[in-house]
Structure formats: structure tokens, C-alpha cells
Amino acid sequence: MLIHPQIDPIALQLGPLAIHWYGLTYLAAFGLFILLGRARLKHEPFASVRAPRPWEGKDVEDILFLGVMGVVLGGRIGYCLFYKPAYYLSHPLEIFAVWEGGMSFHGGMLGVLVAMVWYARSRQRPWLQVMDFVAPCVPTGLAAGRVGNFINGELWGRVADPSLPWAMVFRGAGDLPRHPSQVYQFLLEGLLLFVLLWWYARKPHATGQVGGAFLFGYGLFRFTAEFFREPDAHLGLLSLGMSMGQWLCVPMILGGAALWVWAGRRS
């Protein structure tokens, strides 16, 4: 049975300036997006798009900026709506207290979708083509975020069999060994999804199928990982013994599969 290491959340202290590990994982996610986005410019169909709207490095930077805005706004609003709607309805000003924590991936994803709609219209590009461009560049950022969760010792897993070699005791979660669900999510929706999606996106596909594959793949891997992740304390397990995270993944899986099939038939 392992003990979660007591890792100082502050990576570097420079006088009054504190640099947190979690912030560094976000910087790593942004840097990886830039690198992978520039590599995507060499893939089809983006390498073949000519004037007046060729894909170039500035597009990667603009998409990242808008994506970050979508993640922050959508993630916060999604958390308030999906996880604590009654509380924030009674305390509306606390919606803006982002420093107290509370972000939803599914809300952030919706925020990114809206941001990409705005980008596609402003650049007069097909929205599904934009989503196909972005999708393979996202999983490494998700993996970086899970590293931050593990360092902070948060979002731990459900109680595990003590005989499990990698069962871990997390400070603040009691004395029982638990699944290191952050590691599971890092491996599934981070590394594995990236490898599969990057390989899939290198081949020519109908417009929209890469984005559909991302929705389906992330939804499936997150749904699986949720079986080992401790549900939110104020929600617990919902209908059919599923967590809120799993219920939010259901429309992603169905929507991703439907988009993939529709895009193929449309092509």
C-alpha cells in the first residue's frame, strides 16, 4: 500500500512570487498545444488550403487564446450549473470566485465549442474543419492537468482492495487505500487518447470525423475512469449508480458516434 507523497504545491518561491506546480502544468499544456498545432499544419487538409485563407502559425495562437477563454468561462459556468446549481443560485456573486476552485471539464468543452464557432465564423472556415484541427492537440493538455491533480493530491479515487499493488492513501481522504484515479485518467484520456487520435488524424477522413472520434474517445475513457474515481461528496452516485461525470459523458459518446457516422455519410 502506497502513501501519496507530500509534494509542496509551490514549485518555486521568488520573494512574494509563488509559482505553483498546477500553474506549470497549464503552461506545459499550452506549450504542447502550440507544438502539436504547428505539426498539424503539415497534415491534410490543412496543408493544402491556399489563399485567401491558408492555415498558418497565427491560427494556432489565436485558437489557443480563444480556447483558454472558453475553458475558463465554460468550465466555471458548467461547474455552477452541473454540480451546485442551487447553491450558486442563492449566492450568485460567488460564481466569480474562481480562486476558490470549482471547474467542470464538460462545461469547459462546451465553452471551447462556442469559442471555435466564433473563430470559424470570423475566419470564414468550416467549423467542423476547425474542430478536426484542434481535437488531436487536446489530450496532452488533459494529461498535464491530471499531473497537477496528482501533485495536489485532489480528485482521488474510490476505496480500493488493500492488495492492489498501487493502491494509495491520500491525505485528507482518510486511512483507507484508494485508486489513484488521476493516474488512470492521465493514461486513458491523456496519453492513450492522444496516441490513438493523432494516428487516426494523420489519415484522410471526412470533415468532422476526427472531432467525432475525440468526443467518442474522451467520453468512453472518462466514463470508464469514473468507475474508479470518488464521486463528488455533495452529489454521490446518481441514477443507475452512475456519477455526474459519467452522466455528462453519455451525450459525448452518443454525440461523437453520431457525428462520425453523419460526417462519413455526408462525405
Image (tube, grey):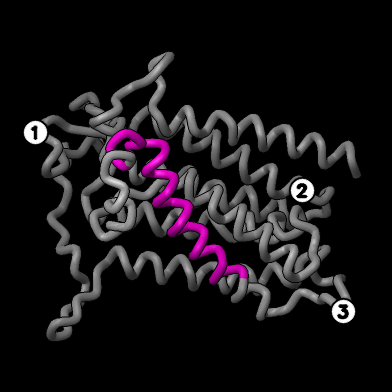
Residue 260 or residue 89, whichever sits in front? 89
Badge 2 is on which residue? 208
Q: Residues within 10 Å of mark 3 (few under 14, many from 20)?
A: few
Q: Residue at x 42, y 33 (%)?
A: 245
Mark 3 and mark 2 residues within 8 Å of each other at the beta carbon: no
Residue 61 location (% of width, % of height): 59, 76
Q: Is residue 27 above or below residue 173?
A: below
Amino acid type, mark 1? Asp
Q: Is residue 103 above or below residue 35?
A: above
Pick out the residue farthest to the bottom: 15
Marker disc for residue 175 = 1
Badge 3 is on which residue? 52
Kind of element beneath mark 3: loop
Q: Nearer the viewer, mark 3 or mark 2?
A: 3
Mark 1–mark 2 distance (CA, rounded to whole Å): 47 Å
Residue 70 location (% of width, % of height): 52, 59
Confirm whether the magenta stretch covers residue 66.
yes
Task: State which tag comes first along the sequence, 3 or 2.
Answer: 3
Confirm whether the magenta stretch covers residue 183.
no
